[in-house]
Image (cartoon, helix red, strand yellow):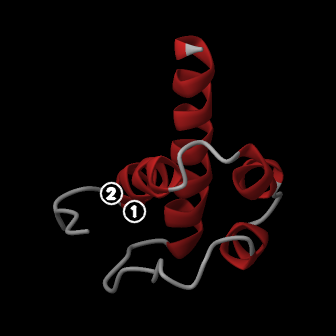
Amino acid sequence: MYVSEALTSRERGLIVGHAYATRYHGDRVKLRPIVVARTADEVRANVDSTVIEPAALDSPVAFWSGFAHGVAAFLVEDGARH
């Protein structure tokens, strides 16, 4: 997935995290550990290796924080639909 370099690391993470959750169709068992992770390393450890941290990030921690928030946003949206 291409994400514009004009976005902040957190914004890029939000977009990629939401897309990741969409790909797993809201599989809460798979996605919940990402949402409850406390650190960027914990988030990264719970994500399939298909997601690679983009190069040229101003902050990898912000990217993974955004990623977790993107997954959480998807789960909230998905829950509201059902």
Q: Nearer the viewer, residue 52 or 77?
A: 77
Going by the image, does 49 lie left or right of 14? right
- The foreground one among 55 and 77 is 77
Q: Which residue is mark 1?
A: 9
* Element type at mark 2: loop
Query: Residue 64 in the image: x percent, y percent?
Result: 57, 64
- Residue drawn at x 63%, y 21% is 79
36, above or below 46, in the image: above
Residue at figure coordinates x 53%, y 56% from the top left: 67
Quadrant position of the N terminus in the picture: bottom left
In the image: residue 1, left or right of residue 81: left
- Please name the residue shown 40% across and 58% down the image: 16
Marks 1,2: beta carbons within 8 A:
yes
**Mark 1 neighbour class, 10 Å CA radius: few under 14, some 14 to 19, many 20 or more:** many
| Residue 55 in which image quadrant | bottom left
Which quadrant of the figure contains the C terminus?
top right
> Real-space Cα distance between discs 1 and 2?
4 Å
| Residue labelled with disc 2 | 8
| Spot occupied by residue 59 in the image (x, y as percentages of width and height) | 48, 71
Residue 37 x, y percent position in the rendering: 81, 57
Q: Is residue 40 left or right of residue 14?
A: right
The image shows residue 45 at horizontal and vertical percentages of 74, 78
Compared to 10, does 61 lie above or below? below
Question: Which residue is at a point 57% across and 13% down the rendered structure image?
Answer: 80
Amino acid type of the residue that numbered disc 1 sits on in the rendered structure: Ser
**Callout 1: SS:** helix
Disc number placed over residue 24 in the picture, else none: none
Q: Nearer the viewer, residue 41 or 76?
A: 76
